[in-house]
Image: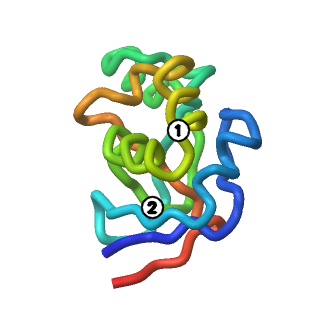
Amino acid sequence: MYIIIVRRPIGEAPEWVRDAWIGMTLPLLVQQRRDWRGIGVLSGPSRVLPQLWAMITGRSFTVDGFVVGARDAIERLEQHNPDAAQWWRTHAPHMMRRRASFIFDAGACETVS
């Protein structure tokens, strides 16, 4: 299952970077929409244990949406908008880790099989 980004997703990246996702088709890591706990890609911790601690201590937020692999998404973004992909590599390099993920809010997405 895939999502197509049809509107600017919520998030901490600049608007032009979030706008770069519009029109892209991304494969889902989890094949359903649901409420997820998230942390900011810029304001939240970049390491796994501090991220878990942020969630336990209430420094996370709920997002109704879909989860995609961040590294795969950024690599696909490279083909669509190289400058936006480079922004992610420069400002949030921790999102290039193998298990990192993005949550795209449901309002920004449409699902396709």
Q: Is residue 56 left or right of residue 14?
A: left
Q: The disc labelled 1 sits on which kind of residue?
A: Pro
Disc 2 on helix, strand or loop?
strand
For the C terminus, the quadrant is bottom left
Q: Is residue 101 visible?
A: yes
Q: Is residue 58 visible?
A: no
Q: Are marks 1 and 2 in contact (CB under 8 Å)?
A: no
For the N terminus, the quadrant is bottom left
Q: The disc labelled 2 sits on which kind of residue?
A: Phe
Please name whichever residue, 84 or 95, is drawn nearer the observer in this view of the structure. 84
Q: Height in image: 46 above or below 21? A: above
Provide residue 63's location: percent of width, then percent of height. Answer: 57, 53
Label 1, label 2: how many angstroms apart (C-alpha)? 23 Å
* Tag 2 residue: 66
* Tag 1 residue: 82
- The residue most toward the bottom is 113
Provide residue 65's location: percent of width, then percent of height. Answer: 51, 62
Q: Nearer the viewer, mark 1 or mark 2?
A: 1
**Mark 1 crowd level (few <14, some 14–19, many ≥20, 10 Å Cα):** some
